[in-house]
Image: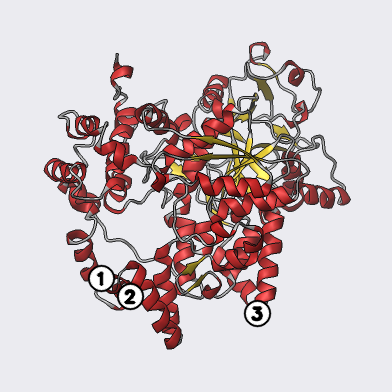
Amino acid sequence: MCGIGGVFSPGGEPVTASELGAMARGMCWRGPDDEGCLLENRQGERRLLGGEDSAAEIFHSKLPYTPVPSNAAAPLDDAWIGLAFRRLAILDLAPSGHQPMCDPSGRYWLVFNGEIYNYVELKGELAALGHRFLSTGDAAVILAAFAQWGEGALARFNGMWGMAIWDTKERRLFLARDRFGVKPLYYQWDGKRLRFASELKPLVLDGPRRPNRRAIYDLIAWDWVDHTPETFFEGAMRLPPAHALTIDAGGELRLFSYWNLAERAAQQSATAPRTESEVLDGFRSLFESAVRLRLRSDVPVGTCLSGGLDSSAVLLTAAAGLDHPMRAFTVGYADSGFDERPFAREVARQAGAVLSETAPDGSDLFDTLERLVWHQEEPAAGPGLYSQWHVLALAHKEGMKVLLDGQGGDELLAGYHRYAFPHLRDLLRRGRLAEFARDVWGVGARQGHAETVAKVLSPWLPRAFFLWGRRTLGQGKDRVVHPDLERDCGRPEPAWPGGFRSDLSNVLGWEMTERFLPSLLRYEDRSAMAHSIETRLPFLDYRLAEFVFSLPGEWRVRGTTHKWLLRRALGARLPARVTQRRDKMGFETPTDRWFRGRYAGELRDLLLAPSSASRPYLDRAALERELEAYLSGKRDIGLQVWRWLHLELWLRTFIEGRAWKQAKAA
């Protein structure tokens, strides 16, 4: 797990060592163990530099990619390609794990952020084909796989990655991101220079910054973030998940997709298991393999533990394959409505794990927000970040570098109550009327009969009806949108795309690839890497996802029971209290209590001040009206308030560059 960056300048100004060094230092928390840079010009002259954080043994390792200290290197003033790297050492802790790394031939050069979990199996296959390896880690396997199979190597990787490979023979740069986008990769292209990095700060902080108004509109009106290749900074793009990018010496840029979940699920559906025992055995086997692969590490591996189904399944499955107690980390609050620690303790006892707990009280909310705004780089749609931050801070304090996590289980296995509606539509479409009548009554008893019927029938009713109801009777998120922003950027919420075999899979596939999961992965990556921690996500093993999406929807939802497949396949190893849970929490945060109490004044000062940075985007009169209704307890719009606040602080921090905390200003 690391931070990568680089510049390719086929038609622009030369790339300098100072530029690369600044990119690396701009994300030093992603890799506190080592730094390296590569510079090369059109004639093939090369300079390999090591940073101040590199250990002395790096400079004496006598590898083909051994760097020299930056202050000892001869200048290279006409470089057109540069790669930068910050290392968090997890596999191959020796100097041979240093990057930028080349293959034995010297043709391919790599900087890589992430993990290829099946590198052991791939290494054996490649060794049988004649490849030799200078490192015991996964980076060397990537280079050999690329030399053997080219771009097709991506289909063989099981892992998470943001990578860049420079081909010195073809003079072509190749960038790629993993299937679900667990690891980030951003880029800028002005027609002359391509700049890329694991974070946005190395790309945007060295020049003028303009906010992306469409991204701001989507945040305010629809609570969408990370749903398109565009970022909140104009001109800075994210490489989409399951995509690669190439650019050659002539400046020709090509962007393409190499994997599609709907297509893969359709291919597997013809041979998908049919009986219940086959499905349960198949899921169980794949999940256990996903967890086992993610335990591969040369440093200890722990886990986040909320006490819900997903994180509990991960811990108990991982612990069963270890010969030592696993470390687990959780958070809780004095308010029992936000405290899952009793569940986490029971799971930890059953797993024989050592559980560490943290219990923040909100007194550091704005101090934590200052760091969250900086590290998240773009606004966030919910306050669960605060709880997650404290879990990761605790793990870092106790020396952890790698944590497993249950992220992705809800979207893969239909963990939210809202997934009942597309499932009911599937029953109706298929003419399974007795099941529909039974289940629609059960769902309606939980969520309201009128709302249930309306949402089930929504595809067949006028869309204007729902937009009117959303604005007048619902949360009314777009009430506070500034008229100028609405005029320039307003748009209706698009329907989810198709491609899967059912409405439920269409919704889940959309939320995994576009709507929700990309933002959750960004939150987790930034907060974890801010503490120099790598998180690994077994539920996002692509083999598991393809298997689950090849099955009919009733394997995920039955009646009012969600995650039915997980409960049935792994329920025997989980405490009954956990498998029987129907509430949905997962590191929730009691921000409503804090906002309406000790921080009400700060909220008013930040959002309603004449100098508020969000004034061009939020209608002042509507904002004041909605905020006061929230603070008085008349409207439960805490998530909206969080978005307004995070937008305000983001604008002040990144666009205006001014202090927003009294202590900071002083």
Residue that badge 3 annotates: 274
Depth-wise, is mark 2 or mark 3 nearer the camera?
3
* Residue at image coords 23%, 31%: 606
- Of the pair 205 and 285, the residue shown nearer to us: 285
N-term mark: 2 or 3: 3
What is the three-letter code of the residue carrying label 1? Arg
Name the quarter where the N terminus is drawn: top right
Distance (Cα) linking label 2 and label 1 = 8 Å
**Contact, CB < 8 Å: mark 2 with mark 1?**
no
Residue that badge 2 annotates: 459
Distance (Cα) linking label 2 and label 3 = 30 Å
Is residue 350 visible to the viewer in this orientation of the structure? Answer: yes
* Residue at image coords 18%, 52%: 479
N-term mark: 3 or 1: 3
Distance (Cα) linking label 3 and label 1 = 37 Å
| Residue 405 image position (x, y, % from top left) | 58, 47
| Residue 324 image position (x, y, % from top left) | 75, 40
Is residue 194 visible to the viewer in this orientation of the structure? Answer: no
Regarding mark 3 in the picture, which secondary structure is present there? loop
Regarding mark 2 in the picture, which secondary structure is present there? helix
- Of the pair 460 and 157, the residue shown nearer to us: 460
Crowd around label 1: few <14 · some 14–19 · many ≥20 (10 Å): few
Residue that badge 1 annotates: 463
**Contact, CB < 8 Å: mark 2 with mark 3?**
no
Image side of residue 358 versus residue 609, left or right? right
